[in-house]
Each structure stands twice: as structure tokens, then as C-alpha cells.
Amino acid sequence: MVLRSIDDANAGRWRSIAVRITGSDVKLPDPIKVPELMEEFIEWLHETKEHPIKIATDAHFKLVSIHPFVDGNGRTARLLMNLILISYGYPPVIIKADECEEYISLLERAQKTGDEQGFYDYIQDCVDRSLDIYLDAAEKTLVK
């Protein structure tokens, strides 16, 4: 759905070609492995019992690291993360335009080193910020 009317030939299909992330030297899985990796990912998603914010962050990180599509992987990962958060009663995470470089840098560092803590901390800060926005709006509504 993310690529519908943008790239209809690839929309809804696992990638069958090798891809690279522009400006990054992160090595992505071979396209032959994508279906199996996605099956494992979906199984993990159904079975995990972690805290909802950890599930959402892990889901984002795992999906973008598999990079199952030719295009739209980041958008899809952020949509999935927010779907999970919303399904547990959390507000969606907003990655501000002026924070995109930090977001991508933390994600890339986690992919390269396996140290995901900086990425997790960043997403947690984004969740906290979203909660603050919602709480401020609720408070203003209740005060009236």
C-alpha cells in the first residue's frame, strides 16, 4: 500500500534484487533470504511478550534491517511501529524533520555495531514527547 501509485510494479512484493541504502554502507540481506527472514519476523511479532514500546522499536529495527522491499522500507517500518504503539494505547511517534539525520545515524550505528541502545533511547524519547503532546492537549481540554 505504501508504494501504490508510486511504484506499482514493486508494490506489495518482496524485493528480488539487491538494494543499498543511499549514503550508507550497511550490508542488507540477499534478496533470496527475504521471504524466510520475513516469516521469522512475523513469527517473532506474533510471539513476543516484551513491553509495547520495545516491541514497536524492535519491529521497526528488524523490518528496516531486513529491508524486504525495493523502496518504502523506512516508511513501512515507521508505520508498523506506530500501528503497534497505537494498538497498545500509546500515541504515534513523530520523527521531526530536523531530527532525521540523528534518527538515521542512530539506526545505521545500531545496524553496523549491534548496539541498539542509542536507537532505543531515541525512540523512547520520541514516545515521551508524543505522550507529553497528548497530555498537554488533554489538560487544556479539561481546563476549559
Image: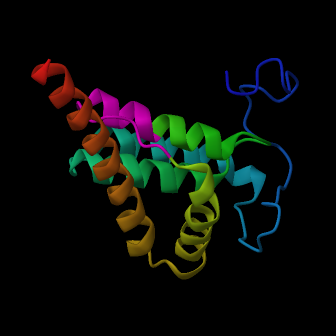
Q: Quadrant of the C terminus?
A: top left
Q: Nearer the viewer, residue 66 or 74?
A: 74
The correct choice, above or below, for 116 with respect to 32 in the image is below
Is residue 65 among the parts visible in the rendering?
A: no
Name the residue rendered at 59%, 47% in the picture.
36
The correct choice, above or below, for 107 with respect to 69 in the image is below
**Which region of the structure is painted magenta?**
81-94
Quadrant of res 108:
bottom right
The correct choice, above or below, for 131 with respect to 117 in the image is above
The correct choice, above or below, for 118 with respect to 16 in the image is below
Is residue 123 among the parts visible in the rendering?
A: yes
Which residue is most to the front?
A: 144
Percent of width and height locating residue 109: 57, 76
Name the residue rendered at 75%, 51% in the picture.
32
Asked whether, in this view, residue 70 is left or right of residue 139, the answer is: right
Magenta highlight on residue 87: yes
Name the residue rendered at 37%, 46% in the picture.
56
Percent of width and height locating residue 42: 45, 39
Q: Nearer the viewer, residue 75 or 10?
A: 75
Percent of width and height locating residue 88: 24, 32
Type of colouring: rainbow
Which residue is most to the left?
A: 143
Percent of width and height locating residue 86: 32, 30
Q: Quadrant of the N terminus?
A: top right
Q: Nearer the viewer, residue 85 or 18?
A: 85
Magenta highlight on residue 54: no
Q: How many marks?
A: 0
Quadrant of res 4:
top right
Quadrant of res 134:
top left
Q: Nearer the viewer, residue 53 or 98?
A: 98
